[in-house]
Image: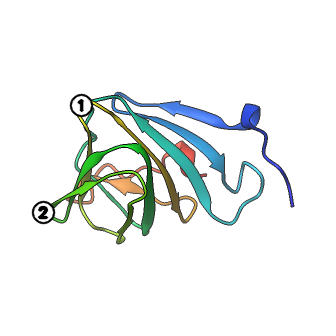
Amino acid sequence: MPVIRHAESRRTETPNAVMTTLASPTLGGAGQALWRVDMRPGAAGPLHAFDAEQVWTVLEGGATVELEGEKLIVVPGDTVVIPAAAPRRVCADPEAGFAAIVTAAPGACASAPDGTGKTVPSWTI
């Protein structure tokens, strides 16, 4: 079983967050993608969907997760199971920010709610 050293993890920065790939098919040969999401206070991601289920566990701070039109408040220790194709947006707590560990099938595609703009985020492969 390979050990992936912290120095080997990959960081991807977007305008809304930093994603750090911890394991994936191209990082350690994992069968699942595992990454950490860090959002600064008040940051908000775009409304989007993935074509695979995601599981998010909150580590620090908090967030409002807009999931299929419902607003869910999450805090450290909470886990959110996000179904495939469910429109979602994550908004970090305005004072504390947000950090979570996320897992999903590798190579999952993200897209706008209308299915356009499909892309495979680099942290999932």
- Residue at image position (49%, 55%) is 102
Residue 76: x %, y % from top left: 40, 51
The N terminus appears in which quarter of the rendering? bottom right
Is 76 on the left or on the right of 23, as rendered? left
Amino acid type for the residue under numbered disc 2 = Gly
The numbered disc on residue 77 is none
Look at the numbered disc 2 and give the secondary structure of its residue. Answer: loop
Residue 18: x %, y % from top left: 47, 33
Which residue, as the protein is rendered here, is positioned at the far left?
A: 69
* 105 is higher (above) or lower (below) than 118: below
- Residue at image position (55%, 43%) is 122
Is 39 on the left or on the right of 26, as rendered? left
* 5 is higher (above) or lower (below) than 95: below
Residue 58: x %, y % from top left: 42, 52
- Residue at image position (22%, 32%) is 94
- Residue at image position (75%, 31%) is 7
The residue under label 2 is: 69
* 38 is higher (above) or lower (below) than 62: above
What colour scheme has been applied to the protein in the rendered image?
A: rainbow
Q: State the CA–CA distance, disc 1 to disc 2.
A: 20 Å
Look at the numbered disc 1 and give the secondary structure of its residue. Answer: loop
Q: Residues within 10 Å of mark 2 (few under 14, many from 20)?
A: few
Residue 3: x %, y % from top left: 83, 50
Is 117 on the left or on the right of 29, as rendered? left
**Towards the viewer: 36 or 118:** 36
The residue under label 1 is: 42
Sequence-wise first label, 1 or 2:
1
Q: Residues within 10 Å of mark 1 (few under 14, many from 20)?
A: some
**Towards the viewer: 3 or 28:** 3
Amino acid type for the residue under numbered disc 1 = Gly
Dividing the picture into quarters, in which one does residue 99 lie? top left
